[in-house]
């Protein structure tokens, strides 16, 4: 156990954890919103994130984005990739809801059927990108890791005096971007008219319907918003790691789900708290032991927290109003 390495670089490791946790938190928002409204764990959401990473690659390929472009082109390419990823992920999430979940709701299927259907949708999307698209379109599709152009070069912005902490442009974009999107979503849900509809359905769907709230539209909105957040996370992930793969969403999705449960499933702010704590715990574990312990630590933390706080750290449902 290398505790000295952790202590000597505590500030740097904490920043690494916050960067990683910011991505988990954005993906976790999709899980927590769908659960808050439908009491459903959408296990296809991990592949919604995966589709977003491929959308980023597609946008970069179409516009010919490469490393070394001018500042204006980098900004334009990044914004186009952001829009493309959000549209692709939101569209995929909406398609899953319309094709898979809505028919089950109309038939009054039990919760277990929804769970199995979500797992099935996840496998279908994985195989589409891992096998089917390779047959029809060829590379880069297939069961291999695909590199994404490093459009945004990592540059040191400043160093905090007295701390082993170097702030880079990519870290700032990832952390600030995640927090801004989280605040925007939280404000939308708690302050807007559509957000009141989301909270009403989450609190009491039957009463909300009697009051004129269209439940189907609310559910569609929830999937779209959750998918869009996964698309933002996909862009931020590619900025940090520059890769994608047909099954890249599997581990990310599990950790994002863990973050959602850790913070309080159905709680938007809990998703952010859970994601950040999970990212920090993983980096600390990797430093003390080795990188192989990162995944183990994530789930050990979840089990320990749930033993003492079964509803998660914040434990507040989406249906409750906030000041």
Image: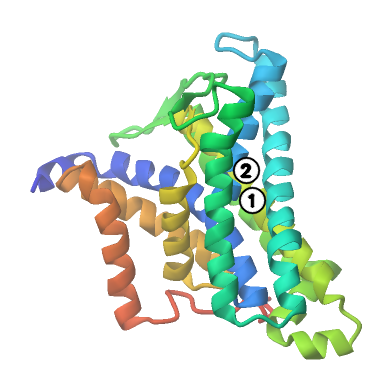
User: What colour scheme has been applied to the protein in the rendered image?
Assistant: rainbow
Q: Secondary structure at mark 2?
A: helix
Q: Residue at x 67, y 63 (%)?
A: 186
* Res 21 visible: no
- 88 w.r.t. 199: above or below: above
Residue 121 locus on image (x, y percent): 59, 56
Which residue is tagged 2? Answer: 232
* Image coordinates for residue 114, horizontal then vertical, percent: 60, 72
What residue sits 52% from the left and 72% below the top? Answer: 265
Which image quarter: residue 133? top right
Return the residue found at the far front.
Answer: 135
Left/right placement of residue 147 relative to residue 73 reads left
Residue displayed at 58% across by 65% down = 117
- Find disc 1 in the rendering and name its residue: 229
Quadrant containing the C terminus is bottom right
Q: Residue furthest left?
A: 1
Classify 10 Å Cα crowding around label 1: few (below 14), some (14-19), many (20 and above). Answer: many
Q: Quadrant of residue 102?
A: bottom right
Q: Position of residue 90 (x, y in %)?
A: 71, 49
Task: Measure the alpha-carbon separation of dots 1 and 2.
Answer: 5 Å
Give the answer, above or below, for where 6 lies relative to 276. Answer: above
Disc 1, SS: helix
Q: Which residue occupies the foreground of this view, 82 or 163?
A: 82
Q: Is residue 237 visible to us here?
A: yes
- Residue 96 located left or right of residue 208: left
- Number of labels in the image equals 2
Q: Is disc 1 in contact with disc 2, using a CB cutoff of under 8 Å? A: yes
Residues 165 and 224: in front is 224
Of residues 76 and 247, which is closer to you in this image? 247
Residue 71 point in image, percent of width and height: 65, 14
For label 2, count other residues whose C-alpha is less than 10 Å away and answer few (under 14), some (14-19) or many (20+).
many
Instruction: Give the vertical position of 56 relative to 92 (above or below).
Output: above
């Amino acid at each position: 156990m290398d505790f000295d390495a952790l202590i000597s670089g505590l500030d740097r490791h904490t920043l690494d954890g916050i960067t990683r946790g910011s991505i988990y938190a954005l993906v976790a928002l999709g899980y927590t919103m769908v659960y808050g409204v439908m009491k459903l764990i959408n296990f296809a959401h991990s592949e919604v994130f995966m589709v977003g990473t491929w959308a980023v690659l597609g946008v970069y390929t179409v516009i010919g984005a490469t490393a070394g472009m001018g500042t204006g082109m980098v900004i334009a390419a990044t914004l186009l990739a952001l829009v493309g990823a959000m549209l692709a992920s939101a569209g995929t999430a909406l398609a899953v809801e319309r094709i898979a979940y809505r028919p089950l709701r109309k038939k009054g299927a039990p919760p277990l059927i929804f769970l199995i259907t979500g797992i099935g949708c996840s496998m279908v999307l994985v195989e589409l990108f891992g096998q089917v698209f390779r047959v029809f379109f060829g590379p880069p599709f297939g069961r291999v890791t695909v590199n994404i152009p490093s459009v945004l070069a990592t540059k040191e912005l400043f160093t905090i005096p007295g701390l082993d902490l170097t702030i880079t442009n990519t870290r700032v974009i990832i952390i600030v971007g995640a927090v801004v999107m989280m605040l925007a979503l939280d404000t939308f849900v708690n302050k807007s008219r559509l957000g009141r509809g989301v909270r009403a359905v989450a609190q009491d769907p039957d009463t909300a319907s009697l009051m004129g709230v269209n439940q189907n539209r609310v559910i569609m909105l929830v999937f779209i918003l959750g998918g869009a957040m996964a698309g933002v996370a996909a862009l931020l992930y590619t900025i940090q790691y520059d890769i994608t793969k047909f099954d890249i969403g599997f581990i990310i999705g599990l950790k994002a789900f863990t973050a959602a449960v850790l913070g309080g499933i159905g709680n938007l702010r809990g998703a952010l708290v859970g994601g950040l704590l999970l990212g920090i715990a993983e980096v600390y574990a990797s430093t003390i032991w080795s990188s192989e312990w990162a995944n183990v630590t994530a789930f050990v933390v979840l089990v320990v927290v749930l033993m003492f706080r079964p509803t998660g750290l914040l434990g507040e449902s989406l249906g409750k109003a906030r000041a």
